[in-house]
Image (spheres, helix red, strand yellow):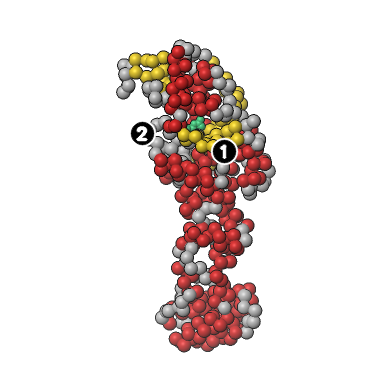
């Protein structure tokens, strides 16, 4: 039975790299019909904050990475104490009198100074000599065990079989193996994931796109796109397939196919995934995910919005489309195309052509108007029409405007513009 865990420290907002670890750990467990646990590593009382823990759990819930059980290390002090006592009693750890540092006394592990070997699913066999580590600290006091000790005790107690974590923990692994041997725990299988780098290959940081995951949600990224993108950070299926649902990832994922070299975090690619998922949605599905971001959308705008939106937060400002609800208000000079003064006869002809279109779609309006626009000059014909319909120099093209407004309203707006000339 495969048992994996995600073991975040709630000492700050976690970024995409951390959630990639959570995802890979989740996928591996699901793929093998195993169990996936979450363990909040909050032994550092000064730096751990409830706010960060809440954000982690909110992010996992948003992504849909369900876990079977949640643990908090802060609630397990007694367990750690029992192990500490036993290690000391057996002479495998000792209370050490310190001459440096804040503490007079700490608890150190008695390092047997040996070679340890472990198997990493991504990197193969790794051998390290532990001599240089010395008798390292495993607790500041009986009530204050440090990371190296608690991570090993918990993984053992929780029956973790596969440890999926960031490459930055490789150098900790020899210490963990020594402690595993000392408490009689089996050595789990490790998978150390490659680092995630910014586009310039520097370490991913907040300034370089490592936002808290909930920020992506609030910007209007879809969880499907985020999951899909995270999965591609260091893993690929070995085919050209790029779009994967969570279920498909469970099917296809394998830790053995994770690359060793760093993965690049690319915002543009993430946006591309978002766009793909929006395109695949039905209009109703789109309306549903857009709902938290919009107020008062004219019903007719939805198909256009779906087509144009990359991030749902773009829907927060729809002032560009206010011409839908109110007639434009402008001075007649605005109808001039560059140096060409607006021409009443030309706009009247435009109206006549538009009146002749019976099935009032953008394609039909365009087909009817295009020859005239080509003959008279595109700007000369289409610019005054755009202004007449929207009052704005930045708007969807005038054919789309016609379709959105409908024939009657379009003609009424053109009439108003003609009356100004
Ligand atoms: N709490 C550690 C971290 O946030 C993870 C330790 C582990 O996965 O073994 O980096």
Q: CA distance from mark 1 to mark 2?
A: 28 Å
Q: Position of residue 165 (x, y in %)?
A: 53, 33
Q: Position of residue 10 (x, y in %)?
A: 43, 38
Front position in the image: 202 or 225 = 225
**Label 2 CB less than 8 angstroms from ligand 1:** no
Front position in the image: 150 or 24 = 150
Residue 180 vs 352, above or below: the answer is above
Q: Nearer the viewer, mark 1 or mark 2?
A: 1
Q: Which residue is mark 2?
A: 46
**Residue at coordinates 54% horizontally, 80% vertically from top-left?**
410
Q: Is residue 119 left or right of residue 210?
A: right
Secondary structure of the residue carrying tag 1 is: loop
**Residue at coordinates 45% horizontally, 24% vertically from top-left?**
80
Let me know if residue 123 appears in the view: no
Q: Position of residue 3 (x, y in %)?
A: 60, 32
Q: Earlier in the sequence, mark 1 or mark 2?
A: 2
Front position in the image: 35 or 113 = 35
Q: Which residue is mark 1?
A: 68
**Label 1 CB less than 8 angstroms from ligand 1:** no
Label tally: 2
Let me know if residue 239 appears in the view: yes
Q: Quadrant of the C terminus?
A: bottom left
Q: Position of residue 388 (x, y in %)?
A: 49, 79
| Badge 2 density bin: few <14, some 14–19, many ≥20, Cα 10 Å | few
Front position in the image: 260 or 80 = 80
Which mark, by number, is residue 388?
Answer: none
Residue 348 vs 149, above or below: the answer is below
Secondary structure of the residue carrying tag 2 is: loop
| Badge 1 density bin: few <14, some 14–19, many ≥20, Cα 10 Å | few
**Residue at coordinates 41% horizontally, 20% vertically from top-left?**
137
């Amino acid at each position: 039975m495969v048992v994996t865990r995600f073991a975040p420290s709630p000492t700050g907002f976690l970024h995409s790299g951390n959630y990639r670890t959570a995802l890979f750990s989740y996928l591996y467990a699901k793929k093998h019909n195993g169990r996936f646990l979450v363990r909040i590593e909050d032994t550092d009382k000064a730096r751990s904050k409830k706010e960060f823990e809440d954000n982690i759990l909110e992010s996992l819930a948003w992504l849909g990475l369900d876990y079977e059980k949640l643990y908090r290390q802060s609630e397990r002090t007694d367990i750690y104490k029992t192990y500490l006592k036993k290690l000391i009693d057996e002479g495998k750890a000792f209370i050490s009198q310190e001459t440096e540092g804040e503490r007079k006394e700490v608890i150190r592990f008695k390092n047997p100074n040996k070679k340890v070997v472990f198997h990493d699913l991504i990197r193969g066999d790794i051998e390290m000599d532990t001599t240089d580590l010395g008798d390292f600290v495993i607790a500041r006091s009986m009530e204050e065990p440090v990371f190296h000790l608690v991570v090993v005790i918990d993984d053992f107690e929780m029956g973790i079989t596969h440890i999926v974590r960031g490459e930055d923990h490789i150098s900790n692994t020899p210490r963990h193996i020594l402690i595993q041997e000392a408490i009689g725990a089996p050595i789990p299988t490790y998978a150390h994931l490659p680092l995630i780098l910014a586009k310039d290959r520097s370490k991913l940081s907040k300034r370089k796109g490592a936002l808290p995951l909930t920020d992506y949600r609030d910007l209007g990224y879809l969880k499907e796109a985020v999951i899909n993108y995270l999965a591609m950070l260091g893993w690929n299926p070995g085919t050209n397939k790029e779009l994967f649902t969570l279920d498909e990832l469970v099917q296809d994922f394998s830790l053995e196919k994770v690359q060793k070299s760093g993965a690049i975090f690319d915002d543009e690619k993430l946006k591309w995934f978002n766009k793909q998922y929006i395109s695949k949605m039905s209009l109703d599905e789109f309306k549903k995910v857009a709902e938290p971001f919009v107020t008062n959308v004219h019903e007719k705008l939805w198909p256009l919005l779906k087509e144009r939106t990359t991030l749902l937060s773009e829907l927060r400002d729809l002032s560009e489309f206010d011409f839908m609800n109110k007639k434009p208000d402008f001075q007649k000079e605005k109808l001039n195309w560059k140096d060409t003064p607006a021409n009443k006869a030309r706009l009247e002809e435009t109206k006549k052509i538009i009146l002749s279109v019976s099935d009032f779609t953008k394609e039909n309006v365009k087909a009817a108007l295009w020859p005239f626009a080509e003959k008279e000059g595109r700007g000369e014909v289409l610019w005054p029409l755009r202004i007449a319909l929207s009052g704005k120099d930045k708007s969807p093209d005038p054919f789309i405007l016609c379709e959105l407004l409908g024939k009657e309203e379009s003609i009424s707006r053109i009439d108003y513009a003609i009356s100004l000339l």
